[in-house]
Amino acid sequence: MSRSKATKMFVCAVMIAACALAPIAFAVIGTGWTVDPLNFKVQWPFNVPESSRFTLTNGVYHFIVFSNDKPFAPGNTTRPRTEMRFDDYTSGAHQYDADLMVPCCSVGGVDLMQIHTGNAQSPKFGATQLMLFFEASNHGSLHFYSGQQLASNLYGKWFHLNVIHDTKSGLMTVYINGALVFSKHDNKAGDYYMKTGVYAQHGATPKMEVFIKNLQLFSK
């Protein structure tokens, strides 16, 4: 075998190995979706600057909250949070699509994404329809509320999250890295909105943070 041919074969082998190690690209689940404007309001502890808890750098959102932070508004009695609150929707199907990464290895007891009931309907139908908690167990794991585990070994890794809510059928589905991991029907409210970021829950660690990129919302 000539030296040049051997060199070419070596380069090809290196490229194949590199492709095998490269992260798989995931995107929107299904077809027929329309990209929605990314309209949102940021909720963060009211007594500190927004920039101390929420930043956008080179396309990456960084959310931080501390367990002893104030609520997002004076007089509010909910736990500390730094979240994006997206527009309400009352019909059609809606999809959340993003890459998330929780730094290793001291973040837990925090909600990263939720489908919230419209505020006026919360007393009747419950405040939330779905919440995804990140726990410190199993080297960083994602759960349906504090119950069923949906994924593990997530600390320090980018993972792709899709959450779909079809208001006609009431079905909510969760995909991690393109694989369906959870499904459940909503509580039949007529108004909803999605949120993402960090929202302290039971057992919250002193500091909670998440990085989010490639964030998009879709509807059909």
Image: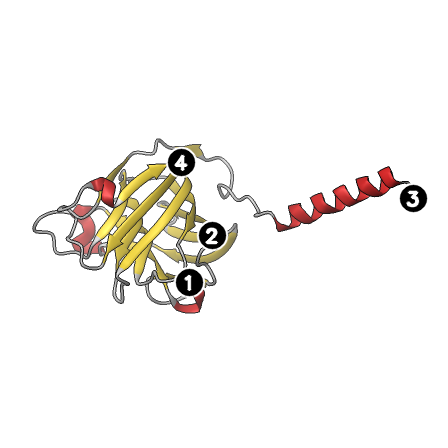
Mark 2, secondary structure of its residue: strand
The amino acid sitting under disc 3 is Met
Amino acid marked by disc 2: Tyr
Task: Give the camera-side residue of 53 and 187.
Answer: 53
- Crowdedness of circle 4 by 10 Å Cα count: few (<14), some, many (20+)? few
Relative to 146, is 52 on the left or the right?
left
Name the residue at the right extreme: 1
Residue 23: % across, % down? 57, 48
Earlier sequence position, callout 2 versus callout 1: 1
What residue does disc 2 label? 175
Callout 2 crowding tier (Cα within 10 Å): few <14, some 14–19, many ≥20: some
Q: Which residue is mark 4?
A: 59
Looking at the image, tell me whether mark 4 or mark 3 is earlier in sequence order.
3
Q: Earlier in the sequence, mark 1 or mark 3?
A: 3
First along the sequence among labels 4 and 1: 4
SS of the residue under disc 4 = loop
Give the Cα separation between the discs numbered 2 and 4. Answer: 22 Å
| Disc 1 target residue | 141
Between circles 4 and 1, the one closer to the viewer is 4
Q: Which is more foreground, mark 2 or mark 1?
A: 1
Q: Which residue is mark 3?
A: 1
- Type of amino acid at the residue the image marks with label 1: Ser
